[in-house]
Image: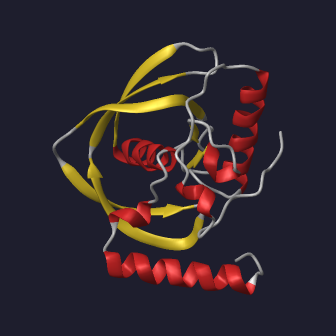
Amino acid sequence: MTIRPLLILPDARLRKVSEPVRAIDNTLRRLADDMLETMYDAPGVGLAAIQVGEPVRMVTIDVSKKADEAKQPKVFVNPEVVWSSPEVAPYEEGCLSIPDYFADVKRPTRVKVKYRDLDGQEHEVLAEGLLATCLQHEIDHLNGVLFIDHISRLKRAMVMKKFTKMAKERGEA
C-alpha cells in the first residue's frame, strides 16, 4: 500500500466528473488499498478516487472514530444515491482536499446508496448520521462537486481566494 498525494483546492481535477468503473481488477483493488492508506494517514473518514488524481467512481469510507475502535474500512464502487430522506440537517464538514476549513452543510439525514464491492457484488445500504453525510460528500466528489458548493457564495469565494493564494505561494498556480 502506498500513501498517495492529495489534490488540494484549487486543483481543477477536483471539478472533473469521474468515469464509471468498468472492471474490478487487481489494479482497482490496489487503488482502493492506497486510498484507505492515504485516508487513514491524513487522517480522514472518507476519500474519493479523484482526490488522489484517479477519475474513477470509487470511494473509501471508515466512520469508526475512536482510537480504540476497530477500523471498519468500506469501499464503494460506482456508488449512487437511489433515495434520500426529505428531512435535512446540518453537519459540520471538512475535506482532505480543502485542509483546515470546516462549514455546516445541510444534507438529507438518510440515504439509500447502491454500489458494488471489490468482488463485483451489488449492494444497497441505508445510511444515516455520519455515514449518510460522508457518502453524500464523497459521491459529490465523483460528480465534481465540493462541499463548499453547498455554502453561501460569499463564503465559497473567500475559501477559493485563500486556497488560490496559497497555491500561488507554493508555485502551483
Task: Look at 59% across and 78% down and name the residue there.
Answer: 163
In the rendered image, is residue 166 in sight? yes
Is 169 or 116 nearer to us in this picture?
169
Name above or below for residue 1 compared with residue 126. Answer: below
Q: Residue 92 falls in which quadrant of the image?
A: bottom left
Task: Depth check: give the residue in front, 116 or 134.
Answer: 116
**Quadrant (top left/top right/bottom left/bottom right) for the N terminus:** top right
Residue occupying the point 78% across, 51% down: 4
- The picture places residue 15, in percent across and down from the top left corner, at 53, 56
Q: Which color scheme is applied?
A: secondary structure
Q: Nearer the viewer, residue 69 or 33?
A: 33
- Is residue 16 rendered to the left or right of residue 25? left
For residue 57, what is the image quadrant? top right
Give coordinates of residue 31: x percent, y percent. Answer: 74, 36
Q: Which percent across, then down, holds residue 107?
A: 29, 52
Would residue 124 be found to the left or right of residue 66 on screen? left
Q: Is any part of residue 68 visible from this angle? A: no
Q: Is residue 112 above or below residue 1?
A: above
Whether residue 133 sits left or right of residue 42 in the image: it is: left
- Which corner quadrant holds the C terminus? bottom right
- 123 shown above or below 13: above
Q: From the viewer's perspective, is residue 27 above or below residue 12?
A: above
Residue at the image point whose x is 20% and y is 39% from the top: 85
Q: Position of residue 156 (x, y in %)?
A: 41, 75
Q: Nearer the viewer, residue 63 or 113?
A: 113
